[in-house]
Image (cartoon, rainbow, N blue to C red):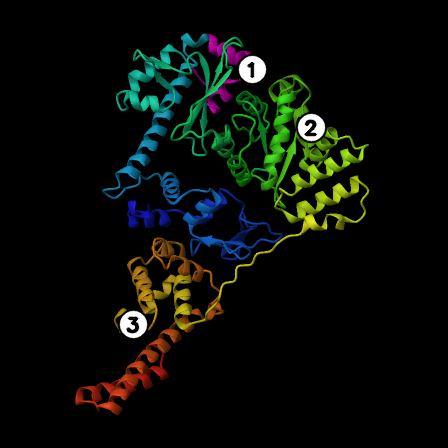
Amino acid sequence: MIRTIPKPFINELLLKTNIVDLIQSRINLQKKGKNYQTKCPFHEEKTPSFIVSYEKQFFHCFGCHVHGNVIDFLMNYDGLNFIECIEELSILNNINIPFKKNNSIIEKKYFYRKNLYELMNNISYIYHKNLFNKNSKNAFEYIKNRQIKKKIINLFLIGYSNTYTLNKILQTQLKNYTKNDLQKTGIININYLGNIYDKFDQRIILPIRDRYGRTHGFGGRSLTENKLPKYINSQETEIFHKKKIIYGLYEIQNKKKNIKHVIVVEGYFDVILLTQFKIKNVISILGTACTKEHFKILFNITKTIIFCYDGDKAGRNASWNTLINALPYLYNDRNIKFILLEKNEDPDSFIKKKGKQAFKKKIKNSIYMSEYLFQNLIKKHDLNTIEGQKDFIYQAVSLIKKIHSHTYKFFLYKLLSKKFGILDINYFKVILKKKNKHIHIQKKYSLMRVLISLIIQNPKLYILISNKKISKIKYKGIKIFLNIIKKCSLNPNINTGLLLEQYREKKIYLILKYLSIWNNMIEKKKIKKTFLELINFLYVKSLKKKLKKLLLKEQKKGLNNKEKKEFWLINKKIIKKQKNLF
């Protein structure tokens, strides 16, 4: 897949993208000397070991050893594949991907998605403008009755679909797109007679956007309770995947980077009304089932998720299912909390009746997962019987085991012990056992390994090398070393992250990636001197190898005049090199 995109373009993207800014947009970094640091987002830790280097355009965790350039970070953090990473970076830098020839499938797929985003954005603005038209009076009255102000209508780009919008879409968009393109948006359908209709007709339109403001799909709300279903969403398309989409994410990420907590609600209008009442960071997941993709996205932007579902039976069930689904994603610094509303109450109705301060109090008093877990389990079991206690403990333990955090599990088991009067936590010793897997990497401090690690970690060292002289050296591994030097000389601005990217498809990539963070035991102030000494030593070693061959020939056959001259010349060079640096 990498071969479908020109290497120079990938290099350009890496040079234009500041890894510090990109990582900072997802997690908080603290300046420390020349570098930036934070707790690693890929494993649990108490003290920060995740380092980001601006100079090298490279990240590395000294705890779990994950490392790489900006592409590696997006792959690990956002779960993207290589092509998706390049798309992400091209969007950030506002440039198109110049695919190579004969790569029509991937290129077509990329431009198909790009055109689909553009078409969806165009349609969302047609819907939005239509809400303020005279022919949409009933829709505007509906919005007005729900107490939504114009500022919020514009923020969420709320719109309305009717015959006028369908005609407008066909009139304007068919200039650049086909009927087939329109159908692929999931908005326009064509019946068996060939007539075109809008599946969102006579509905309030709620665009669902990503962090960049691109419209992926729509939610549609009927104007009356009689028209069922009340809510419909876009069908699954190339760009709309319900399990990955979060409504309101663009609106909160558009405001700030550091988010203390996120409040998850059930409906679009819960998000809209709470935002209007200045309750910050409210989102919806287009339903009640929080998927692993949702948890990954949300925990990437905050450490605390507060769930506030409706107060009915379905809402309570959704809260419990959410707790179960969240357990594998809870680490030491992550939390989930719950706001439990009264029966037949939802966030929209609650804040209208009781106001902003009352809802803020609900946020403040939201209960942690541990409390809600035991609260629910107690309701489900009769603890006055041995059987009830047995079943309670069995279910509690089976849920706690889903959590990966050893510390989190320890305190939950401790709380479980306390509730049953078990003074010795060793009662749960078998459950608490943790297997530690250590990957052993053999460290060979060979001459070439040290040299390659030095040049990868400090690409500017290439200026110290004379290509003509070093190319004469015969030594195992010299070809790859020379290749690295060549790549550095062709790009004077090269850094570690960009240098590694040149070898992503090569067999040697993983070795070079390992050497990019390998501790070669050389002090920073001695790097330049050591590098020159090693090159000199390598050159001497190569000369001695030649000398040895000539000596063996002298012993067997004897040397001719030319070879004798070469012998003394090599000797002279060795003596000189042993006195001076290369």
Q: Residues within 10 Å of mark 1 (few under 14, many from 20)?
A: few
User: According to the image, label 3 marks what residue?
Assistant: 470
Q: Residue 402 appears at what percent x and percent y?
A: 62, 42
The answer to whether one can see residue 126 in this image is yes
Q: Residue 377 appears at what percent x and percent y?
A: 71, 32
The mark found on residue 361 in the picture is 2
Location of the N terminus by quadrant is: top left
Observer-nearest of 432 and 240: 432
311, above or below 364, in the image: above
Q: Earlier in the sequence, mark 2 or mark 3?
A: 2
Q: In this rendering, would 423 be left or right of 407?
A: right
Q: How far apart, in angstroms, are the residues tagged by discs 1 and 2?
A: 22 Å
Mark 1 is on which residue type? Gln
Q: Specify the farthest residue to the left.
A: 561
Give residue 554's quadrant in the image: bottom left
The mark found on residue 475 in the picture is none
Q: How far apart, in angstroms, are the residues tagged by discs 1 and 3?
A: 76 Å
Q: Earlier in the sequence, mark 1 or mark 3?
A: 1
Q: How far apart, in angstroms, are the residues tagged by discs 2 and 3?
A: 72 Å
Q: Which residues are magenta?
A: 138-160
Under tag 1, what secondary structure? loop
Q: Residues within 10 Å of mark 2 (few under 14, many from 20)?
A: few
Q: Is residue 569 magenta?
A: no
User: According to the image, label 1 marks what residue?
Assistant: 147
